[in-house]
Each structure stands twice: as structure tokens, then as C-alpha cells.
Image (cartoon, rainbow, N blue to C red):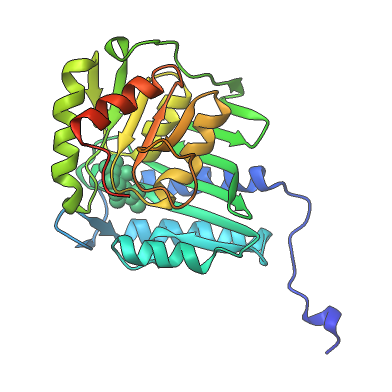
Amino acid sequence: MSTRDREVYTVGSKSFTAVAVNTAAKAGEWIKTKLGAHSKLATKMSSHDLVTEVDKGSEALIRNLIMTHFPHHSFLGEEGVEPGPEAAAEALEAHQHTEYLWIVDPIDGTTNFVHGFPFFSVSIALAYKGEVIVGVVYDPCRDELFVAEKGKGAYLRGQKMGVSDEMRLSDSLIGTGFPADRSALPVNMIGLQAIVPQVRNVRTAGSAALHLAYVAAGRLSGFWEIGLNAWDLAAGALLVQEAGGTITDTKGAPYSLSVRHVLASNGKIHEEFRGALKQAGALGDN
Ligand code: IPD
Ligand code: CA
Ligand code: CA
């Protein structure tokens, strides 16, 4: 067999973004057909950390579609990694010299999916040499597909998205979440107790990726959470940046794939928001 015969066949002429969009849409539509119809419910790290056959099926579908178009790219999906922060850090480390890395959460908001609460998403990002260049978050229940390309903006239904205008924490609607790793719960509760009285209100709707998309769309002024993983954040981080917002870790360092304690906002409230968490001792251990 000649070298040419052995070359992996690649389906031609599709952009990274087109593949991310089509794949997220396809996975989301399939997940929606399984709403209320999953058959296998298991727990991972704790009784709060759920997984179903639909999470695994969605990841397999996404991986197959992406690998069909880009067989030489690498893939990091939540369901391919052992539960827990150490395994997640190791998986990321293993890809540190990878050129093109797809980072996927096949259902972000599994608890909502299991309970039939219509707020979950598919999150697909592509990083080039560690920097996210494409981010797609798809909400199948509302048929909302949020898409961003590095340097080209963030869009929803063809309209450019922009972050909200609030200048003060007191005028802000803030999102947060409670991670499956319950060792972070004490610091979460401290943060919540400090933030609730200082803002207009707080929402904890159960999908970090969608919360970030909502910051990008100006529906939330900001979002923070302790103890997230690369697949929860990568796509949403680019959405926030490309919509003109700011995303850092809770200590203020710029977003990177290894960030676990995240702070995202419209930019205008970022320092006040960070200051409030800092004063409460709720930044988490980095
Ligand atoms: C979870 C969701 C939730 C957040 C948790 C995540 P999963 O992801 O994003 O909103 O609070 O920290 O683990 O487990 O549904 O993919
Ligand atoms: Ca997730
Ligand atoms: Ca998930």
C-alpha cells in the first residue's frame, strides 16, 4: 500500500465553525428526543454528579461527526475523562502540545435534563495551541444557538450579541452554580451569601455554558462559579469575550483552558464583582 493510500480520508471544504454548529445542532436535537426518556441514570463523583446514556450517546455522536471532518484533530470530551478535578487536569495536561483540540460537554446541565427542567446545552469549542478559536453553545429547548469565532464576534440567530450595560453590581443580574465537586460548596455558600444582598438578583439555572452564553447575550450581567472544568467553560468563554465582556479566573488572571474558578461579566462590573467575592473570602483555592 502506498503512503497515499494509507492517508486518512477527510471530508473536504467545511469550516471549523460550520462543523461545530452543525454538530451541536444535531446533538441537541437528538438529546431533545430523549427528554423524559432516558433509561440509565448513574452517579459519578458524588450523588450530585449525574450521567445518563444520553450524555454518552451525545458525546459519541459529536466525536464521530467531528472526527469525520477532522480526523487529525484531538478530542477532549467530559465523558471520556474520569470524574474529579485531578483527572480533568491530567487530561488537559496530556493535550498541552496539541495543535487543534475540540473540547466538548455533550450535555451541560444533566441534572436539569434528568428532571425535565428545560435548561441544558451542548457545548463545543475548538482550541488552537491552547487558545479557543470557535465556541458554540446550543440550547435545544429554545432552539438557540450561540456561536463565536475568535476576532469575528459572537452571534445568535445571525444577530451580533453584546454584553449588558450595567455599571454597578447593585443593578446587576448575576448567575452562579453549584458544582458536582461538593468540596467547593462551603466557598460557594460564602460567595452566595455575600453577593445576593449586593445585586439585583441571582440565578442558578444549572448550565454553566448557557449562563456564559447569557452573559454574552446581555441577559445576565455576570456569572461566577467555583470548580468548573474546561468543557464547561471553553465555548462560553469565547462567547463572552467576543460579545465584549470579560472573563478571568476569580483572582483576575486571564481566562485559559485550565481555569476552574471563573468570573465572567459585562466588563463594567468586573472589578466590583471580584472585589465583593474577594472581601467575602469566596475566590476559591486556585
Ligand atoms: C454542570 C452544570 C452546572 C454547574 C456544574 C456543572 P454537567 O455540568 O454546568 O450548572 O453548576 O458545576 O458540573 O455535569 O451538567 O455537565
Ligand atoms: Ca458541564
Ligand atoms: Ca456534562
* Vertical position of residue 148 compared to residue 37: above or below: above
* Vertical position of residue 50 compared to residue 235: above or below: below
User: Residue drawn at (56%, 25%), measured in percent from left and top?
Assistant: 157
Residue 11 sits in which quadrant? bottom right
User: Relative to 230, is 102 on the left or the right?
Assistant: right
Task: Give the image location of residue 208, x and y in percent.
Answer: 35, 39
Task: Give the image location of residue 67, x and y in percent.
Answer: 61, 63
Task: Give the image location of residue 128, x and y in percent.
Answer: 64, 52
Give the number of callouts.
0
Task: Give the image location of residue 37, x and y in percent.
Answer: 26, 51
Question: Which residue lies most toward the bottom here?
Answer: 1
Residue 224 sits in which quadrant? top left
* Visible residue check, residue 109: no
User: Residue drawn at (64%, 37%), measured in percent from left and top?
Assistant: 150
- The quadrant of the picture occupied by the N terminus is bottom right
* Visible residue check, residue 13: yes
User: Residue drawn at (60%, 43%), measured in percent from left and top?
Assistant: 134
* Towards the viewer: 169 or 116: 169
User: Residue drawn at (44%, 36%), measured in percent from left and top?
Assistant: 248
* Towards the viewer: 206 or 177: 177
* Towards the viewer: 264 or 286: 286
